[in-house]
Image (cartoon, rainbow, N blue to C red):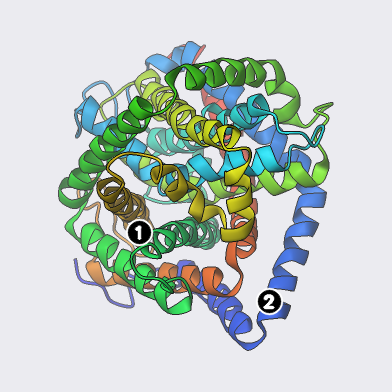
Amino acid sequence: MSVNMLKLRLFVILPPVVLLFTGLAFSLINEVAFVALLQTLVGQLISQFNWLFSWSTFSFVLLVVAVYISPLGTRKIGGPDAVPILTRWRWFAITLCTTIATGILFWGTAEPIFHLRDYPLTGEPDPAFAMSTLFLHWTITPYAIYTVAGLAFALAYYNRKQQFSLGSMLFALRDRPVSERTAALVDSICLYALVAGMAASLGAGVLTLAGGMEQYYPGFSGPFGYGLICLAIVLAFILSAGSGLQRGIRWLSGFNFIGFSLLAVLIFSVSPTGELLELAAVGLSDFFINFLPRSTDINSGIPADWQQDWTIFNWANWFAWAPISALFLGRLSVGYTVRQFIRVNWLWTSLFGGVWMVIFGGSAIAMDEQTGGDLQLLLTESGAESIVYALFATLPGQKIIVPFFLLLVFLSYVTAADSNVSAMSALSIKGISPEHPEAPLRVKIFWGSVIGLVAWTMVSKAGLDGIRSISILGGFPAMLLIILVAIGLVRTMVNSFGPR
């Protein structure tokens, strides 16, 4: 399929590109004013819509459970005669590795130390709170966002035969397709949201890789080093995305899953097992006891600024990825039932995230307590990216573990970016269908370059605060879309109780 100006959806492509490059130019001209503007915009959004982030994510958890037990759960995606394009193992591996990106590798050890250092309830370190917060931010709630969005698209695309567009997810709201202009507007907004979310995640990955490279090449951190890392990652995921679903991403996801599992087993085997299991128990207890108040921010006892800096930031980042991820996750699910979709995209991924956080977050907490707060001091002096390497320094075989970890960080983002760049590129042209699912390589190169440039600017000019800010700015419009999608999914579920 050749790309020409008639097939490019310019109304979809141009608005997010103009907005993003305007922001980049502003940051280069006046860095201080750029960061101040970001923080002001984010502050306004959070103060006005903090409640909407909290209640929507909590409602999605309830909706996923309701859909699973409803008659809709038995419906086959693609119709009774649909045949899966992936085995269950391959489906789960691709789903997991394209959704976690570098998040669990960067935040798995760093986030609990932040919470230990700045416990919002009493000011004293509380391992149970730190662990339960990891469960909140990395298990059932965020994966409910992806599950709602992906399921809505799968049913619209395969069962209702709608076009390959994010606007198709709104079909169930009125049981008729949205207009071409509305679909293009939705796609355009979500392209901006995803570039923001991917740039934030790539920024976290760049910081993690730069922290590791510092051990071998002192002085590597900085705009030049960040630029080299961004360039290498972008080139890798463009090459992978260019090979299509059946080649690059299958190999990457399989390697990543095995690598994640081996690394987790290794860390667990050399960590204080009893202490990790105890942390898991007290963390789970605190998680379930406080799930309702902390999810809805009602009588949680947690200050608003902490809630905004952490929980809302996490929800915004997941929302930013959700619409485009829905296209990819939905496309994988043909031939399976709705309940199977929920098990793979919500339950199994949440279990993996929980186990990972017990092993890595628990090990970081245990090490900090054993050393009297060494990791908290390191966090202040050297940044969040240094925590995981301090943990590795206590292990035998560090010279093997660190390069292997760096490879996993690199490939994990490549895997996630591969799937989303493919989906973004498909949104940018006309004629995508189940028979012709891939966009031309030159479109993928364009979006990969945009993401890399935005990520490099954010991490070089605004650091971790800039990463947080752009996540929230991208996540807000995406959240509004997914709320509408969820309402449509409720309608579909209610209708499933009637005659089919």
Above or below for 104 versus 423: above
Give the amino acid type for the residue marked by disc 1 in the picture. Answer: Val
Query: Horizontal and vertical percent for residue 400?
Result: 25, 48
Give the amino acid type for the residue marked by disc 2 in the picture. Answer: Phe
In front: label 2 or label 1: 2
Residue occupied by mark 1: 421
> Residue 422's quadrant in the figure?
bottom left
The reply to whether residue 494 is in sight is no
Above or below for 499 versus 7: above
* In-image side of 354 versus 298 (left or right): left
Q: Earlier in the sequence, mark 2 or mark 1?
A: 2
- Number of numbered discs visible in the structure rendering: 2
Quadrant for the N terminus in the image: bottom left
Above or below for 93 versus 392: above
Crowdedness near tag 2: few (<14), some (14–19) or many (≥20) residues, C-alpha within 10 Å: many
Crowdedness near tag 1: few (<14), some (14–19) or many (≥20) residues, C-alpha within 10 Å: many
Residue occupied by mark 2: 34
Residues 427 and 369: in front is 369
Residue at x-position 37% and y-position 73%: 449
Query: Horizontal and vertical percent for residue 163?
Result: 37, 48
Residue at x-position 68% and y-position 22%: 291
Residue at x-position 53% and y-position 23%: 64
